[in-house]
Image (cartoon, helix red, strand yellow):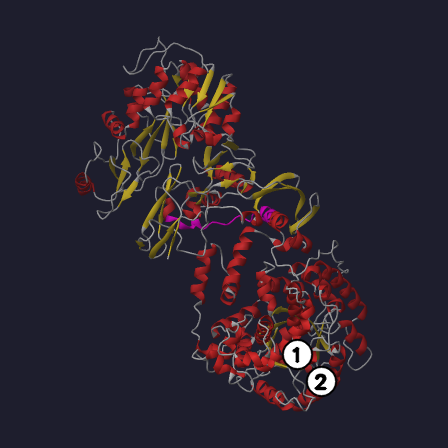
């Protein structure tokens, strides 16, 4: 009597051991007396061993486990009553294949029976025979049956003799390519090659034509025709089983064609991996119980098993959750499981292997974590339950196939039950994998990294963040009042400019969100702190002309040091402040970078910035080079933004002796910008050189020349005269001046917001800004500023200095140079640095100094101080000196042509024969292929790439790449408070992190372990009441330790063969083997093997470098 179960094209069968009183159905069937089993050993590991142990325990049978040296921490040895080591000194897999050791353990410990599980020795006739010879029962078919069923050719012949339909194929293993040709000529292509005695995990290989290279791993193979599409259905009983005397459980596999005809493939003479589906969907019989009872000598009638009693009981689906990466052809992943939470609930069964927090997944064995079985009344119900269960899983530390399984379960073809053997090939969307968010664990990784290695962003001075967070003022409920942005959206840039010009009173731009913290706090203020105060600003400062919150250095620093997306900052602030125009700083043809870009990049940047909520673009050029300015203006205008052309100011128009940058110079330049169509004209005084008299002279002249044009004045308060200067500008006819929150003003920042509001209050220049609200705003920023104590310029600079009128150092650069001097122990020599800055400026021809020209002057000044050179000495030795790169490129013309031309003979001495750029530097650059860049980014980062990402990569390719890699490992960092972001938590500190509305993490830092042999420290946390731990590499300790080099994601030529060998792109180089899965490594490029880092049979970890190709 046989029982059949359908599973993935296979049939489960359960043969009987007939009692001595029952007549034999076949001469091969043995007659055994009933003999109870009291002790069972499982010659296997992992999930199947645990499955058998559980069945034995339910039957009151004592259990014995065996384990290899590599499996000392595996769960199966802990689930057994006894456990013994086997295969000492052998390779991991060989330990479980070492029959003498297994038999020795069985005999020494009075084992009655051995269950082989599946895999390893389960289909080895010699193992079944060894058990029988040792007087130990083998829970499975007899050795002779195992041998016959294991020989695929003989099993096929038996099926044919029994009248079972088979797929056309060879009657014996082929021995030559000629035989394969003859078979294919008869039956046509495609054909399948299958190993006659098992392929060791290589599986079947489909051949579509003669032009196929020979497989070195398959010698004896059986060819099968595969011209039809094959599905899976139930098949008729397998009549060959009685002929061979099949006893115990096994699986018969058939193919089914579209007409419902069944074709025999093979028999697996063991318990199948998917036996759990049979258990849930077709009977309530525990197949392992039945196996053991049959091995004891009981018959199927004794067990109450009759064919007519077998009924379909709903539907069951099994998913094998493995540590395989579907995105990398299901390559096994290894590592430590940091988090494991399974899906459970009604209708779900879990058969676990060794899936638990802290478990180490090795490359030596099967990648199975857990088998999930869902049962329902029908196929859609079972699929729904399975989808729900998989969605509940949380596995962190290793990759799994869960995203792929979820895609399969959501596929309509699968849900309809119409899949065939080409299902995966015809549904490539199955591999469109949705990455797991993994937010909590990524945050713990970041915090652990900070606790072990310190801050990830460079810290200028040793100062701890304030222990208290800033107090956010109360914000009224409801939408904010209308502001100037409403006018802009309604009337466009031209109407907006008219409204500004017709406005009664002085308008203000708040720089607190950008230039103020760039000048005072090294541009380190995070979006986290900007967002907190944004609703207050929207509700209380709706009369502001604009908020400067983007562009300039913030774009670079956001990604480089704060690990934030600058575009995301713009989007989030726009959502919180819908009523006030946003303003950014655009470096003309340089956009927000420090170099020249193709014109199409600048135009696309402005277009996308406008789409993301930017309104007013202050366009400037560090040299006031008109072609660069005009390019930026055209890009902004094309995007539909408000063009605010800026003239960078230097010198002193009120001083008759300063003739290079005279009033006439500025008036002529303004004429050009107005003619080019600017909506607003700005005077950008980046060093704070505008004195009240100069303000009156310049602004009144501009007002007289351009009575209908809005004038906007920007300055810094380094000298302390900023408020007076801005009041003078306002009285002379300026429409807008720049200010910063009181606690973020002064020194190298902008003049005080409160001071301008108070000084104009009740006058024709009244700003309309409520002074009492300014006080609350300042209080918030005073608290926030304390969080950035390590970056605060007041750590080294206690006040501004009127000597800025002499050295003309821009505000932000003044702060940076001061920091650098102190960090290099030259704080007392800062006066010399400033003096050298003056000399460097004169050497270069008295430049307008703003990024990047200010950096050029600063680099030359530091070069002169470091080498002890005066201006005269530097000019005299110019032909021999190796000047900073920025200086050389400036002299070549890479940022444009300065007013008055390049300094000679210095330029000729430094450049010698180096090429010179004529005209606008970016004009000769070919357009950047943004679509190709997007494709490249998608291939590298494996996720959806936005137009904003493409532009970030175009501006800062290396910075963006590092940012993406960093945030793929750590994050979401924007949910951390600034103190935690910079310093990390203290031991025993408890805190909350809000990931999103309604999702809050409760975290407590517990402990840090000592250093392990891998150079790591284990950091322990309590997360939402559960213990979590992560391993963090101690970067300082690892400098003194040797490790196998790791492959770099962005370096292609790091894989290979023999050093010195020439390799072609796509050429197979080596084979990586993990358990039964083999991965052929091919060359990603053409080149020569430079160095090999591995040897044959070496054990590797993830990301280990194999070799390098150049």
Please state if 177 lies on the left or on the right of 392 as rendered. Answer: left
- Residue 627 visible within the image: yes
Q: Which mark is residue 97?
A: none
Q: Quadrant of the N terminus?
A: top left
Residue that carries the numbered disc 1 in the rendered image: 808
Q: Residues within 10 Å of mark 2 (few under 14, many from 20)?
A: many
Q: Quadrant of the C terminus?
A: bottom left
Q: Which residues are magenta?
A: 426-445
Q: Residue 231 colored magenta?
A: no
Q: Nearer the viewer, residue 703 or 3?
A: 703
Please state if 165 lies on the left or on the right of 988 as rendered. Answer: left
Q: Residue 434 colored magenta?
A: yes
Name the residue located 71 percent from the left edge and 85 percent from the top edge. Answer: 695
Q: Position of residue 417 (x, y in %)?
A: 41, 40
Q: Position of residue 716 (x, y in %)?
A: 70, 75
Q: Residues within 10 Å of mark 1 (few under 14, many from 20)?
A: many
Quarter residue 485 falls in = bottom right
Q: Position of residue 28 (x, y in %)?
A: 29, 16
**Looking at the picture, does residue 381 appear above or below residue 993?**
above
Q: Earlier in the sequence, mark 2 or mark 1?
A: 2
Is the stretch drawn in magenta largely helix, strand or loop?
helix
**Looking at the picture, does residue 145 appear above or below residue 1063?**
above
Please state if 55 lies on the left or on the right of 644 as rendered. Answer: left
Find the distance from the CA under tag 2 to the CA under tag 1: 17 Å
Q: Nearer the viewer, residue 117 or 230?
A: 117
Q: Which element type, helix, strand or loop, lies under badge 2?
A: helix
**Looking at the picture, does residue 65 appear above or below residue 1043?**
above
Q: Which mark is residue 695?
A: 2
Name the residue located 38 percent from the left edge and 9 percent from the top edge. Answer: 33
Q: Nearer the viewer, residue 207 or 550?
A: 550
Quarter residue 824 falls in = bottom right
Q: Which element type, helix, strand or loop, lies under badge 1?
A: loop
């Amino acid at each position: 009597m046989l029982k059949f179960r359908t599973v993935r094209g296979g049939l489960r069968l359960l043969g009987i051991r007939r009692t001595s009183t029952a007549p034999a159905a076949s001469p091969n069937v043995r007659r055994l007396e009933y003999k109870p089993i009291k002790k069972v050993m499982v010659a296997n590991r992992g999930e199947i061993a645990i499955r058998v142990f559980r069945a034995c325990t339910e039957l009151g049978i004592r259990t014995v486990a065996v384990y290899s040296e590599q499996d000392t921490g595996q769960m199966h040895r802990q689930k057994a009553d006894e456990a013994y080591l086997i295969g000492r000194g052998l390779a991991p897999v060989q330990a479980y294949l070492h029959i003498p050791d297994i038999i020795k353990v069985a005999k020494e410990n009075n084992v009655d029976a051995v269950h082989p599980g599946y895999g390893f020795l389960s289909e080895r006739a010699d193992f079944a025979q060894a058990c029988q010879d040792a007087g130990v029962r083998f829970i499975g078919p007899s050795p002779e049956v195992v041998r016959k069923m294991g020989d695929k050719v003989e099993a096929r012949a038996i099926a044919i003799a029994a009248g079972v339909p088979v797929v056309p194929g060879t009657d014996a293993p082929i021995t030559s390519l000629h035989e394969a040709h003859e078979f294919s000529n008869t039956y046509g292509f495609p054909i399948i090659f299958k190993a006659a005695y098992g392929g060791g995990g290589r599986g079947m290989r489909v051949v579509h034509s003669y032009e196929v290279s020979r497989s070195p791993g398959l010698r004896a193979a059986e060819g099968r025709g595969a011209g039809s599409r094959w599905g899976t259905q139930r098949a008729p009983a397998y009549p060959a089983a009685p002929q061979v005397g099949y006893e115990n459980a096994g699986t018969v596999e058939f193919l089914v064609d579209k007409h419902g005809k069944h074709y025999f493939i093979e028999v697996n003479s063991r318990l199948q991996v998917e036996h759990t589906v049979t258990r849930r969907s077709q009977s309530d019989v525990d197949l392992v119980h039945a196996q053991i009872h049959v091995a004891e000598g009981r018959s199927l009638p004794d067990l109450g098993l009759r064919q007519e009693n077998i009924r379909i009981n709903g539907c069951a689906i099994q998913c094998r959750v493995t540590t395989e990466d579907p995105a990398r052809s299901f390559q096994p992943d290894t590592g430590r499981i940091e988090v494991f939470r399974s899906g459970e609930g009604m209708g779900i069964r879990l058969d676990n292997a060794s899936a638990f927090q802290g478990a180490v997944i090795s490359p030596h064995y099967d990648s199975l974590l857990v088998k999930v079985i869902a049962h329902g009344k029908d196929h859609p119900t079972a699929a729904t339950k399975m989808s729900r269960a998989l969605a509940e899983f949380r596995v962190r530390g290793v990759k799994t196939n869960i995203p792929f399984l979820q895609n399969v379960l959501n596929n309509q073809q699968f849900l309809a039950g119409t899949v065939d053997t080409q299902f995966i090939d015809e549904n490539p969307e199955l591999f469109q994998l949705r990455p797991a968010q993994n937010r909590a664990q990524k945050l713990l990784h970041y915090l652990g990294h900070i606790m072990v290695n310190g801050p990830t962003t460079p810290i200028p001075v040793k100062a701890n963040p304030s222990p208290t967070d800033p107090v956010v003022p109360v914000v009224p409920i409801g939408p904010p009042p209308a502001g100037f942005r409403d006018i802009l959206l309604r009337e466009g840039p031209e109407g907006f400019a008219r409204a500004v010009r017709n406005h009664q009173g002085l308008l203000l731009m708040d720089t607190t969100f950008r230039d103020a913290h760039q000048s005072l706090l090294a541009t380190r203020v995070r979006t986290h702190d900007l967002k907190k105060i944004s609703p207050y600003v929207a509700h209380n400062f709706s009369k502001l002309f604009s908020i400067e919150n983007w562009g300039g250095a913030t774009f670079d620093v956001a990604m480089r040091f704060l690990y934030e997306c600058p575009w995301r900052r713009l989007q989030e602030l726009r959502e919180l402040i819908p009523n006030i125009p946003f303003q950014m700083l655009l470096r003309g043809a340089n956009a927000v970078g420090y170099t020249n870009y193709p014109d199409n990049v600048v135009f696309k940047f402005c277009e996308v910035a406008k789409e993301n909520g930017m309104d007013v673009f202050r366009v400037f050029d560090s040299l006031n080079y008109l072609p660069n300015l005009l390019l930026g203006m055209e890009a902004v205008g094309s995007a539909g933004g408000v063009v605010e052309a800026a003239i960078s100011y230097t010198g002193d128009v009120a001083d008759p002796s300063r003739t290079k940058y005279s009033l006439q110079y500025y008036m002529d330049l303004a004429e050009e910008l107005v003619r080019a169509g600017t909506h607003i004209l700005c005077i950008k005084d980046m060093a704070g050189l505008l004195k009240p008299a100069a303000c009156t002279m310049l602004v009144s002249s501009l007002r007289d020349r351009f009575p209908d044009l809005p004038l906007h004045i920007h300055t810094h308060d380094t000298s302390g005269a900023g408020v007076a200067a801005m009041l003078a500008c306002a009285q002379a006819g300026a429409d807008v001046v720049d200010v910063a929150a009181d606690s973020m003003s002064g020194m190298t920042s902008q003049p005080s917001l409160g001071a301008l509001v108070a000084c104009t209050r009740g006058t024709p220049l009244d700003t309309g800004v409520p002074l009492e609200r300014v006080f609350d705003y300042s209080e918030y920023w005073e608290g926030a500023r304390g969080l950035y104590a390590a970056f605060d310029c007041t750590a080294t600079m206690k006040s501004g200095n009127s000597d800025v009128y002499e050295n003309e150092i821009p505000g932000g650069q003044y702060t940076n140079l001061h920091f650098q001097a102190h960090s290099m122990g030259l704080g007392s020599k800062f006066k010399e640095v400033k003096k050298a800055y003056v000399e460097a400026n004169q050497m270069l021809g008295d430049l307008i100094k703003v990024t990047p020209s200010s950096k050029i002057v600063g680099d030359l000044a530091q070069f002169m101080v470091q080498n002890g050179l005066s201006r005269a000495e530097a000019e005299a030795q110019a032909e021999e000196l190796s000047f900073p790169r920025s200086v050389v490129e400036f002299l070549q013309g890479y940022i444009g042509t300065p007013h008055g031309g390049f300094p000679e003979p210095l330029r000729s001495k430094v450049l010698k024969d180096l090429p010179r750029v004529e005209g606008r530097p970016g004009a000769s650059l070919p357009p950047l292929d943004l679509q190709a860049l997007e494709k490249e980014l998608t291939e590298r980062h494996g996720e959806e790439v936005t137009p904003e990402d493409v532009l970030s990569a175009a501006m800062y390719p290396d910075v963006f790449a590092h940012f993406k890699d960093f945030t793929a490992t750590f994050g979401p960092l924007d949910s951390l408070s600034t103190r935690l972001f910079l310093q990390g938590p203290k031991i025993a500190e408890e805190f909350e992190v809000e990931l999103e509305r309604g999702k809050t993490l409760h975290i407590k830092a517990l402990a840090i372990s000592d250093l392990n042999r891998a150079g790591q420290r284990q950091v322990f946390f309590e997360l939402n009441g559960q213990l979590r731990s992560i391993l963090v590499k101690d970067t300082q300790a690892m400098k003194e330790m040797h490790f196998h080099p790791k492959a770099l994601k962005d370096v292609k030529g790091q894989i290979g063969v023999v050093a010195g060998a020439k390799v072609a792109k796509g050429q197979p180089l080596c084979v990586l083997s993990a358990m039964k899965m083999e991965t052929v490594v091919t060359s990603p490029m053409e080149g020569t093997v430079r160095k090999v880092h591995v040897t044959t049979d070496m054990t590797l970890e993830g990301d280990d470098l194999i070799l390098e190709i150049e």
